Each structure stands twice: as structure tokens, then as C-alpha cells.
């Protein structure tokens, strides 16, 4: 594995760890502001987009697309991120966090692999297959069991929404792994997040409420959500995908629920059960299997 490839993996790991903070920060924001999950997700995108655009402007690196191709990439990324936020948080309302996380995060690598295998960008090796199997088992252990008394209709709707969220994240991974020349990552992602945030907040305004009384705690948490699991995470993810396939990126992103579980235990005082600990170990194993360099073949 080259130094560039190792650096790319490092950026992907950083992205996954940053994403793992969103649950703990989201719980704090909900308690401090009274916002629903969908509204919090919309504000997260909006603040993240503002921070990215502000960063690019401050460094005199604001690069607006000059062609229709660049603007189409911004529109596609903005739509994918808004669908991911809306579908995932809506799924939680039907099947709970455990099942929504399992289906969303678990389905994404398989979807990305299917696309990249069909195009020849990624080959399904024995090691990658083992990594995917370990990842699914780890997610099942980490997510736990579905809510008691879950109705069949709720299960079907919630699972469909979670699969939609998984497809949206798969789209984000594929877009990042196939860059276009007229798309600056900082500027383009910032604009995409601004558009996506507006779309999610519009939906939240129809189904719930988006107004809240700002306080020092709620504003600080909102900025943290926009900065860590949004701006830093996605920029790191796209940077890592410059040297890695979308399949590798999607598998490494499985570190997100591991980080979230550890943070919930340390910060929120949630008890870390033995099956969840075993699931975290399996997810880390899956990432390590994906990150190991392929063996050189002899003639």
C-alpha cells in the first residue's frame, strides 16, 4: 500500500469517527432546544454548509463551478444528503434507532460494491467478502433488537425508509469516488449542504416545527454538529475517496456506529453490553480487513 493510499484511509477513518459524534451531539441539541430529529438534521446540514462556505471564503478559495457539470454535481450531492437525513430520521420514528442504523449502514457497502463491481472499479475478493460478513454480524450485535411490539406495517415502512437512506449514502460515496474537474470539494460540498439543509428544514416545517429559542448551549451544540459530523467529516471523507474506492469508503464508515456506541457509554452513561462490545470488535475487524494491502501475485 502506498503512502497516498494509507493517507486516504486515514481521512476515511477520521470521517467515520467524526460521524460517530452526531448521536451524542444530537441528543444534547434536542434536550437544549426541543427540536425534533428531522429539524436537527436540517440545521446540521445548513450550519455545516455555512461553515464550509465561510472557510472557503476566508481562505480566498471560493471556487464556484463554471460549467453545468459542476452545478449538476452540487445538485446531486445536495439531493442525496437531504434524502439521507430525511429518510434516516424518519425511519427511526417507525423502527427505532437500532433497526434504522442496522439497515441503513449495513446496506450501503453492499449497494456501493454492486455498482463498482458492475463497472470494474472494485473486485469482490475473499477478504472483502469476509469483511462484509463481519460488518453485518457486527452491526446486528451492535444495533441490538427491534422495539417490543413493533407492528408489521411500521416495520415495512421503517425498513423501506432505512434502505432509502442507505441508497442515498451509497450515492454520496459513489459521487465522492468519481470526482469531476469543475467541482471544488469545499465550495461544492458547502453549497450542496446549504441546499440540502433548506430541503430538510422545509419538510420538517410541514411535519413538525423548526423554531426554537436560542441559548448558549443550543447554539454551541448546533455549531458543533455543523462542524464535526458535517463539515469536517464529509470533507475528510471526500478527500479520502480520492485514492480509495467507494466500497472501501462505505466499509470504513462502519466505524461510525462503533464510535457512537463508545461515546454514548462514556458521555451519556449508557451501559455497554457484551454483545455490543463484540459487535464493535467485529466492525473494527471488518475495517482492518478492508484496509490491509492486497498480496502481490507472482507470474
Image (cartoon, helix red, strand yellow):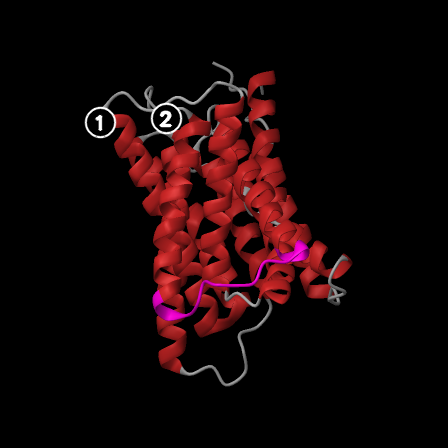
Magenta region? 206-218
Q: Quadrant of the N terminus?
A: top right
Q: Which residue is at a point 39% across and 21% down the rendered structure image?
A: 63
Q: Residue furthest top?
A: 299
Q: Give the camera-side residue of 160 and 238.
A: 238
Is residue 134 depicted above or below 208 in this figure? above
> Is 247 covered by the magenta stretch?
no
Q: Position of residue 67 (x, y in %)?
A: 24, 22
Residue 286, visible in the rendered structure: no
Residue 227 position by quadrant:
top right
> Is 217 covered by the magenta stretch?
yes
Query: Which residue is label 2 attached to?
Result: 179
Q: Position of residue 190 (x, y in %)?
A: 44, 35
Is residue 31 depicted above or below 219 in this figure? below
Q: Residue furthest bottom?
A: 149
Q: Position of residue 294 (x, y in %)?
A: 54, 26
Amino acid at each position: 500500500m502506498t503512502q497516498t493510499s494509507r493517507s486516504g484511509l486515514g481521512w476515511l477513518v477520521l470521517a467515520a469517527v467524526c460521524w460517530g459524534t452526531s448521536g451524542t451531539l444530537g441528543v444534547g441539541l434536542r434536550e437544549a432546544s426541543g427540536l425534533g430529529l428531522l429539524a436537527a438534521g436540517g440545521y446540521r446540514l445548513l450550519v455545516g454548509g455555512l461553515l464550509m462556505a465561510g472557510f472557503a471564503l476566508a481562505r480566498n478559495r471560493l471556487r464556484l463551478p463554471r460549467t453545468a457539470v459542476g452545478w449538476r454535481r452540487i445538485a446531486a450531492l445536495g439531493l442525496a444528503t437531504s434524502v439521507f437525513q430525511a429518510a434516516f430520521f424518519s425511519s427511526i420514528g417507525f423502527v427505532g434507532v437500532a433497526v434504522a442504523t442496522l439497515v441503513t449502514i449495513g446496506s450501503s457497502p453492499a449497494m456501493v460494491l454492486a455498482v463498482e463491481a458492475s463497472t470494474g472499479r472494485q473486485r469482490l475478493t475473499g477478504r472483502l467478502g469476509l469483511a462484509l460478513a463481519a460488518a453485518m454480524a457486527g452491526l446486528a450485535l451492535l444495533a441490538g433488537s427491534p422495539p417490543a411490539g413493533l407492528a408489521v406495517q411500521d416495520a415495512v415502512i421503517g425498513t423501506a425508509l432505512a434502505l432509502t437512506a442507505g441508497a442515498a449514502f451509497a450515492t454520496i460515496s459513489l459521487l465522492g469516488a468519481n470526482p469531476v474537474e469543475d467541482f471544488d470539494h469545499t465550495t461544492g460540498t458547502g453549497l450542496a449542504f446549504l441546499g440540502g439543509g433548506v430541503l430538510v428544514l422545509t419538510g420538517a416545517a410541514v411535519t413538525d416545527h423548526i423554531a426554537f429559542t436560542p441559548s448558549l448551549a443550543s447554539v454551541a451544540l448546533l455549531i458543533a454538529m455543523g462542524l464535526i459530523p458535517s463539515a469536517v467529516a464529509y470533507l475528510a471523507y471526500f478527500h479520502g475517496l480520492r485514492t480509495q474506492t467507494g466500497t472501501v469508503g462505505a466499509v470504513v464508515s462502519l466505524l461510525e456506529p462503533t464510535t457512537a456506541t463508545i461515546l454514548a457509554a462514556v458521555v451519556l452513561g449508557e451501559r455497554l453490553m457484551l454483545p455490543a462490545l463484540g459487535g464493535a470488535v467485529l466492525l473494527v475487524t471488518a475495517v482492518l480487513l478492508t484496509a490491509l494491502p492486497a498480496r502481490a501475485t507472482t507470474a
